[in-house]
Image (tube, helix red, strand yellow):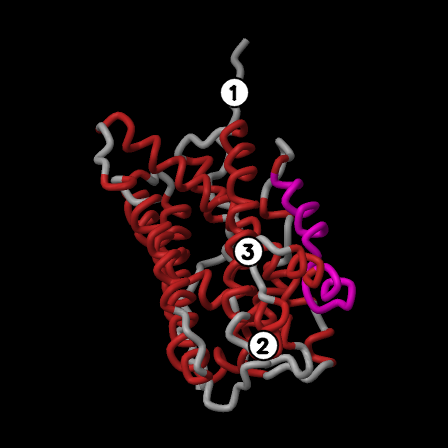
Amino acid sequence: MSTQAKPAPRASHTQGRLQQRRVQFDWSQTPLHWLPQQPFTSHFINEINLLLPAGEFWFCKLYNQALPLVRDAKLREDVQGFIRQEAMHARAHDGAIAEYLSAHGIETESYMRRMNWLFEVALADAPFGRRLPRLAQRQWLLFRLGLVAAIEHMTCVLGKYALENRRWDALGADPVLLDLIRWHGAEEVEHRCVAFDLYRHLGGSYPTRYYLMTISFPVVFGLWVAGAAHLMRQDPLFAAKRPSVLRPWIWLEWQRQAKAGLLPSVFWLAGQELRYLNPWYHPEREASTAQALAYLDSSPAAQRLAA
């Protein structure tokens, strides 16, 4: 009796072809408190402009290294599209720093130096300047790809939140910054499967995925709060609070803002992250590509590109 071999699982779960949308944003009319009467939320979300560029350029560098190892043609195309989209995200947030935050007198260099150190020294090909033995280089690459996969789960969750939050619209949010957040969030939803597919394709295991999430979740959100505190310390409205990642006030205020529908709750986010630890998890089921594409088809920045 002959038995048929089981077909190999598909390497790519990304629908269609990922395209780079070369968007541009005009920051000349965007106020620092882009969400009217909500300075805490404005700074808290503005912090993504500081947090993301160094990491996204690092993603691109890492994925260019991984590209020759990809054996599946569709997944290789996905990775190339992912690189192009992440590069555009980094440039857009760099533009927000240079043309928006700096125009309002916000100092960003000291925080950006810390972010550059994290990605260019601690997570470099030669971490802390120490060249790895050849046998360890592949494992170090896979470890970092696993970090990206865990982070991309977070960005997918946050992207979906941004697409669905209507409280910001009701409060009269600045349309340019709101478009930046939703355009970026929509593309994170659109390419949500790529990092996970690549990690598994190159041999990433479930136990490793488990501990990489336990590392990345507290680090990413700790950096987010630290960056938000850095922005708030430069705002006279928060002078008496002395914002810091180590002071309870900023965490308690985050939760208060979340109850008002202005930010995702840290507890809600923790619950979203726990799904990543499910052995049967796959980002394909986390969000809707159709919802993301619907926004991208109506995004003011993307429409200017089309025009």
* Horizontal side, residue 255 vs residue 67: left or right: right
**Of circles 1 and 2, which is in front?**
2
The mark that comes first in sequence, 2 or 3, is: 3
Q: Check disc 2 and report the residue beneath it.
A: 178
Q: If the image is split into quadrants, where does the C terminus sit?
A: bottom left
In magenta stretch: residue 67: no
Could you tell me which secondary element the residue under label 1 belongs to?
Answer: loop
Above or below for 222 versus 35: above
| Residue 70 or residue 129, whichever sits in front | 129
Above or below for 287 versus 128: below
Secondary structure, magenta segment, majority class:
helix
Q: How far is mark 1 from mark 3, CA to CA?
A: 40 Å
Where in the figure is residue 50, as x and y percent of width and height? 45, 65
- Residue drawn at (50%, 62%), measured in percent from left and top? 227
Where in the figure is residue 93, as x and y percent of width and height? 43, 70
Could you tell me which secondary element the residue under label 3 belongs to?
Answer: helix
Q: Check disc 3 and report the residue beneath it.
A: 155
Instruction: Estimate how packed mark 3 is, as few (under 14), some (14 to 19) or many (20 or more) residues with alpha carbons within 10 Å.
Output: some
**Residue type at numbered disc 1:** Gln
Q: If the image is split into quadrants, where does the N terminus sit?
A: top right
**Residue type at numbered disc 3:** Thr
**Of circles 1 and 3, which is in front?**
3
Q: Check disc 1 and report the residue beneath it.
A: 4
* Horizontal side, residue 307 vs residue 127: left or right: right
Where in the figure is residue 98, as x and y percent of width and height? 37, 78
Q: Residue furthest bottom?
A: 29
Q: How far is mark 1 from mark 2, CA to CA?
A: 53 Å
- Quadrant position of residue 235: bottom right
